[in-house]
C-alpha cells in the first residue's frame, strides 16, 4: 500500500538540497504586502508566497522590501521546516509508577479525605 504523505526521510533529503534546486520544486507567487511599511508596500509586489509542490508546504515572506530577498527568506524558511519535520518523534514507552509514588499518592488521598471529613458543623 503506497502512501502519498512524505516521510521523515523525504524531509531530510529536501533539507539537504541546495537552495537553487529546492526553488525548482516550488511554485512562487509575488503579491503586495499589507500592513506597515509606507507607500512602497502598496505599490510593489515584493511579498513572496512559496509552495513546495512535492510536500505541499507553503511559506510566506514579507519582511523585506526586496522581492529577491523575500525569495531567499522563503527558501530558508522551507529548509528550516524540512529540518524540523525530518526528526522522527521520540518513542514513548509506558512506565509503571514506583511503589513510593503510589504510597505517596494514597497517603495524600487519605489526608485529603480526613480534612474533608473534619469540616462538618459541630453540634452544640
Image (spheres, rainbow, N blue to C red):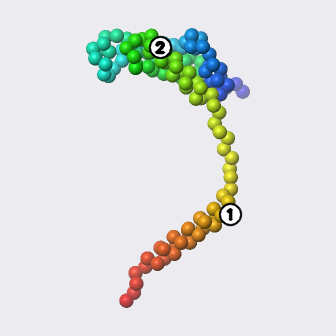
Residue 21 in view: yes
**Residue 39 position in % (x across, y down):** 27, 14
Disc 1 is placed on an element classified as helix
Compare residues 111 and 5 and report the one nearer the observer.
Answer: 111
- Crowd tier of the residue under label 1, counting other residues whose Cα lies within 10 Å: few below 14, some 14–19, many 20 or above: few
Residue drawn where x is 48% and y is 74% of the image: 115
Q: In which quarter of the image is the N terminus?
A: top right
Disc 2 is placed on an element classified as helix
Q: Is residue 18 left or right of residue 73?
A: right
Quadrant location of residue 53?
top right
- Crowd tier of the residue under label 2, counting other residues whose Cα lies within 10 Å: few below 14, some 14–19, many 20 or above: many
Please say if 122 is above or below 1.
Answer: below
Name the outermost residue toward the bottom. Answer: 124
Name the outermost residue toward the right. Answer: 1
Gap in angstroms between the C-alphas marked 2 and 1: 58 Å
Residue 5 in view: no
Residue drawn where x is 68% and y is 52% of the image: 95
**Residue 65 position in % (x across, y down):** 37, 14
For disc 1, the marked residue is 99
Amino acid at each position: 500500500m503506497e502512501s502519498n504523505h512524505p516521510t521523515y526521510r523525504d524531509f531530510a533529503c529536501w533539507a539537504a538540497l541546495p537552495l537553487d534546486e529546492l526553488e525548482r520544486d516550488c511554485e512562487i507567487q509575488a503579491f503586495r504586502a499589507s500592513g506597515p511599511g509606507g507607500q512602497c508596500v502598496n505599490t510593489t509586489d515584493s511579498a513572496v508566497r512559496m509552495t513546495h509542490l512535492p510536500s505541499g508546504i507553503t511559506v510566506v515572506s514579507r519582511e523585506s522590501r526586496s522581492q529577491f530577498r523575500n525569495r531567499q527568506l522563503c527558501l530558508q524558511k522551507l529548509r528550516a521546516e524540512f529540518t524540523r519535520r525530518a526528526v522522527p518523534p521520540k518513542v514513548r514507552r509506558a512506565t509503571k509508577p514506583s511503589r513510593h509514588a503510589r504510597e505517596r499518592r494514597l497517603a495524600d488521598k487519605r489526608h485529603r479525605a480526613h480534612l474533608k471529613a473534619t469540616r462538618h458543623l459541630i453540634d452544640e
